[in-house]
Amino acid sequence: MEVPLGFNFEKGKVCKLRKALYGLKHSPRAWFSMFAIVMKAMRYKQSQGDHTLFIKYSTSGWVTALIVYVDDIIVTGNHQAEIDILKECLIREFEIKKLGKLKYFLGLEVAHSRHGIFISQHKYVLDLLSEYGKLGCKPVETPIEQNHKLGEYMLKMQPWTENPIKN
């Protein structure tokens, strides 16, 4: 590191780096640890299953959740006032931009309507087909009925809890 102009520097002394700089190997870790400290100060709980997920519950029944993926942050919840407070805090603490409603994330398209939120991978699949020159291929019927609703029996089954390997 070079000593900044105008800084009086004695020979034999060193400068201590107090802030992680963009592009350094440990920068993302330093940023995320600072991010986690801010979230915990706002009384959000960090998930043990996914450490990038932060959730805040209230006694009155509302919940707010935030998840971080690299440089994207998704905020959701059922209490708009808490979401607004969270966004303002993030703007104050970090250099972030509000990009509005979620439209595309990790290959998922998110469409909002008055009936709810719909998630699809249509664009992702078209991009894959285009990349491999298969856009002109003809579709075939799928082995399962489209828009099939799972019955109550199927929802109660939890195959992931059973050990498929039997001795």
Image (tube, grey):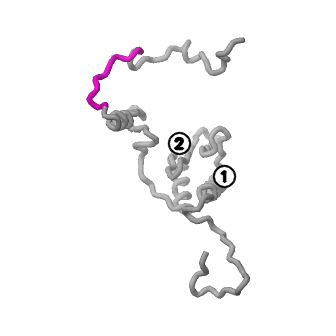
Label 1 Cα crowd, 10 Å radius (few <14 / some 14-19 / many 20+) = some
Q: Which residue is mark 1?
A: 40
Image quarter (top left, top right, bottom left or bottom right) of the N terminus: bottom right
The residue tagged with tag 1: helix, strand or loop? helix
Which amino acid, by three-letter code, is at mark 1? Lys
Which disc number belongs to residue 66? none
- 121 sits to left or right of 83: left
The percent coordinates of residue 156 (x first, y second) are 59, 16
Q: Nearer the viewer, residue 22 or 86?
A: 22
Stretch of the chain drawn in magenta? 134-144
Residue 106 in picture, x, y percent from top left: 46, 41
Q: Quadrant of residue 24?
A: bottom right
Q: Residue at x 66, y 71 (%)?
A: 17
Cα separation, mark 2 vs mark 1, equals 17 Å
Q: Residue at x 43, y 39 (%)?
A: 107
Q: Residue at x 70, y 87 (%)?
A: 10
Image coordinates for residue 133, horizontal then vertical, percent:
31, 34
Q: Amino acid at mark 2?
A: Gly
